[in-house]
Image (tube, grey):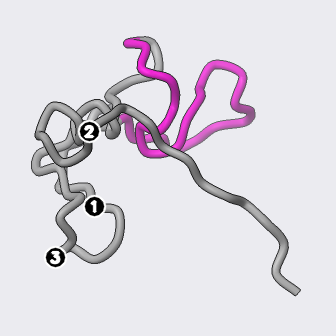
Amino acid sequence: MVYADQACLGPATSSFCVKNFTFFGVVEQEGLDDLDGILGLSPDYSSNGPSYISKLKESGLIDQKIASFFIGHLG
């Protein structure tokens, strides 16, 4: 299913919000063989679904289509 909502990184008052952002709704998944990405942070290919980073760029909120994140262990 495809849904639409306001998507923000940070608080809803953040300047990094995309209004009416469409995204795939996943309600059941046994593996991630056919899916790639988190909230449109996957590479910008149509098969990966809507790209949040592309929408930020199109809206003029960021200068380049680049995203990074760190997943680490606390403690």
User: Label 3 belongs to which residue?
Assistant: 13
Q: Nearer the viewer, residue 41 or 63?
A: 63
Q: Nearer the viewer, residue 61 or 22?
A: 61
Q: Earlier in the sequence, mark 3 or mark 2?
A: 3
- What span is in magenta? 24-46
Q: Amino acid at mark 2?
A: Asp
CA separation in Å, label 1 and label 3: 8 Å
Q: Nearer the viewer, residue 26 or 51?
A: 51
When asked about the image quadrant of residue 54, the answer is: top left
When asked about the image quadrant of residue 12, the answer is: bottom left
The residue drawn where x is 48% and y is 43% is: 67
Q: Quadrant of the C terminus?
A: bottom right
Query: Residue reaching furthest bottom?
Result: 75
What element does badge 3 sit on? Answer: loop
Q: Earlier in the sequence, mark 1 or mark 2?
A: 1
Q: Which mark is residue 8?
A: 1
Q: Residues within 10 Å of mark 2 (few under 14, many from 20)?
A: few
User: Label 2 belongs to which residue?
Assistant: 63
Instruction: Give above or below for 15 relative to 21.
Output: below
Query: Residue reaching furthest front?
Result: 63
What element does badge 1 sit on? Answer: strand
Query: Residue reaching furthest right?
Result: 75
Q: Amino acid at mark 3?
A: Thr
Residue 55 in picture, x, y percent from top left? 22, 35
